[in-house]
Image (cartoon, helix red, strand yellow):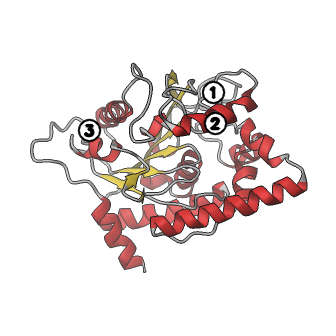
Amino acid sequence: MKKLLAIALTLMAGLAHASSSGYTQTKYPIVLAPGVLGFDQVLGISYWYEIPQGLTSEGAKVYVTSASALNSSEVRGEQLLSQVQTILAVTGAQKVNLIGHSHGGFSARYVAAAIPNNVASVTAVHSPTKGTPVADVLAGLPVGASSLLASIGNAFAKVLDAVAGTSYAESVTGALASLSTAGAATFNASYPAGVPVTACGQGAATGANGMKFYSWGGTSVMTNIFDPLDYLFEATSVAFKGAASDGLVGQCSSHFGVVLRDNYSWNHGDAIDQLLGLRGLFSSDPVAVFQAHANRLKLAGL
């Protein structure tokens, strides 16, 4: 099984085009960690729509990982850890640059704490470092409604696993507990590196062994009326009671390490160029933002 995983990860690694400018050619491989309901590919649609290709086309080596669609930060962190260790073994690289979207930011931080000698940087993209009120609301539902939500959510996650060709333990309850404000606070107490000590400040720029920390987030919800995901984020944004968010993550909660920007005109899906690249007409291009960040890592010697 491990050998098959190694082969799969090798195939997922993007090979730079011969005409690559080298703009995104980091010293260490870039590893992408998905968030809630994350996957590599489902029905031909990539979770990181066009982003890996955009990075590899300019010289980066990129590895796309998978995880439970819904589970605790620790369970998903262990899943990422196993895949990162395989990537290190397959490539011979000493370190990796971890980029996590949403709950994937927690996974990246978990791995950074577990193997600090092998992580060059951690970047949290629209990740609820301080938790999200959306999880608070859902976790606080009456017992009957909560049980129904868990049953439906776990069943949906299993279907997603099957379609994506993966098999993971799923737990709506674990995910909500981890992403709640209380759960995030508990996680942060165990993994404090890069976490801001103030409500809306920046975290430490550097961690163990010179590891670098970065983040960015957004503050738009309904960005394209043709994107069905936008209607979901419009509904979940109610939990923020008017405070700025991307529909699932609050502006200040997205802060981790050096805050590169916290007000992109993106919702939670736009951050990874979903759905199929539908977003605001004049909003920043997520692919270009990821490319610029890879160049940032390159210039930092990472």
Label located before the other in sequence (3 or 1):
3
User: Measuring 54% from the left and 39% from the top, which residue is drawn there?
Assistant: 229
Up the image or down, 215 lies above or below 50; here it is above
Left or right: residue 37 compared with residue 142: left
Is mark 3 in CB contact (under 8 Å) with mark 2? Answer: no
Is mark 2 in CB contact (under 8 Å) with mark 1? Answer: yes
- Helix, strand or loop at label 1? It is loop
State whether residue 9 appears in this view. Answer: yes
Q: Which residue is mark 1?
A: 245
User: Measuring 51% from the left and 43% from the top, which residue is drawn there?
Assistant: 101
Q: Amino acid at mark 3?
A: Thr
For the residues carrying marks 3 and 2, which lies nearer the camera in this image?
2
Label located before the other in sequence (3 or 2):
3
Measure the C-alpha gap from mark 2 to mark 1: 7 Å
Q: Which residue is mark 3?
A: 24
Measure the C-alpha gap from mark 3 to mark 1: 29 Å
Residue that protrudes farthest toward the bottom in the picture: 1
Q: Quadrant of the C terminus?
A: top left
Q: Residues within 10 Å of mark 1 (few under 14, many from 20)?
A: many
Up the image or down, 221 lies above or below 76; here it is above
User: Measuring 39% from the left and 37% from the top, which residue is drawn there?
Assistant: 277
For the residues carrying marks 3 and 1, which lies nearer the camera in this image?
1
User: Measuring 74% from the left and 63% from the top, which residue is drawn there?
Assistant: 151
